[in-house]
Structure formats: structure tokens, C-alpha cells
Amino acid sequence: MNIRCETLTDYPIIAEVNTLGFGQENEAKLVEKIRRSDRYIPELSLVAEVENVVVGHILFSYIDLVNEETLQVLGLAPLAVHPQFQRQGIGSALIKAGLEIAEAKKEAIVIVLGHPQFYTRFGFQPAVVYEIESPFPVPEEFFMVKPLQSYQKSYQGKVVYPSTFDGV
């Protein structure tokens, strides 16, 4: 397996992997919207290849954490693996690679809405532990954060997703 940054020629297969992985087009459309926004981080849109075929994709992009000030933090969404390649460690490898890049870029925190049984393995914890609030009603254990080395206690408040995410 090879993990690398996405390229323009990957866009159609990334859309297909997201659509197949989620069984709907919402996530593929979200990826397209984020790419066209100022929240897109090219080096944090990664693909996993098996025998030179893209079988997985992860995207980290900027979202806002609002308190007395607005801080840009990373949101992890979506993470998709082609159904034929799921449960083989590809999603885990994408998360680890993305977190390493985020650390190298001196990002402070990553926020995800996802399955606790999966994400806690990578150090994600319920956001309420860090006094970070979800923008919508969701059970606490599904809205999680992972503090990185640059994390400081000032990273508290309510998450606000950019309008880019609307309608998806």
C-alpha cells in the first residue's frame, strides 16, 4: 500500500471511493466543495493505493473553533475506503499519515464526528473533555478531538463548520 497526496487526476476515483464507501454521494460532494474553498489543505488530502489503484481517501480541512476569538483547527472528514478493501487497515494507515502531516505542520487539534470504537485507537477523546462543543446535537462520544503537540488550553469553544459544508 502506498499513501500520497491527491492529484488532479485522482478526483474522479476519489469521488467514486467516497460514494461507494458511504453508499451515497454526500461525502463526494463535500470533498468537491472543500477543494473549491479557502479551507482546503492540499497536503492533507491523501489517497491510499493498492497496486497503483486508489482504494482510500482522507481529507483534513480547516474549520473554526469560536470562543472569545476564532481559531482555525483541523476537521477530519471524510474518510472513505472502497468496500472491497475495508477492514484491511487502510483507513487506519490514512489517519496515521494525516496526523503525522498535521503534527509536522504544527496544527493544534483535529476534530472528528465518527465512531468512538474506531477513532479512540488514534488518541481521539470526547470533545467535551476539552470544553469543545459540537455545532449540532450529537451524542458526546461521537464528537471527538485529538490534541496535537501544538495544542494549548485556549483551544475551547464551539465548532463552526464553514458554509462550504452546508447542504451536504
Image (tube, helix red, strand yellow):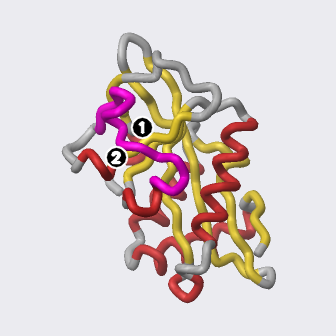
Mark 1 Cα-neighbour bin, 10 Å: few <14, some 14–19, many ≥20: some
Q: Is residue 66 located in the magenta-colored stretch of the structure? A: no
- Residue 137, above or below 4: above
Which residue is labeled 2 in the image? 143
User: Which span is picked out in magenta?
Assistant: 120-134
Q: Is residue 38 above or below residue 168?
A: above
Q: Of marks 2 and 1, which one's residue comes earlier in the chain?
A: 2
**Given the current orientation, which residue lies at the most extreme left position?**
137
**Residue at horizontal 34 percent and vertical 46 percent from the top:** 143
Residue 164 seen: no
Q: Position of residue 84 (x, y in %)?
A: 55, 88
Cα distance in 3D space between marks 2 and 1:
17 Å
Q: Is residue 125 magenta?
A: yes
Q: Quadrant of residue 144?
A: top left
**In this orientation, does residue 86 appear?**
yes
Quarter of the view holding residue 69: top left
Can you identify the residue that label 1 sits on?
162
Which quadrant of the view contains residue 27? Answer: bottom left
Q: Which mark is residue 109?
A: none
Q: In the displayed image of the protein, which residue is found farthest to the bottom?
A: 84
Q: Quadrant of the C terminus?
A: bottom left
x and y, in percent, of residue 57 in the image? 61, 66
The amino acid at mark 1 is Pro
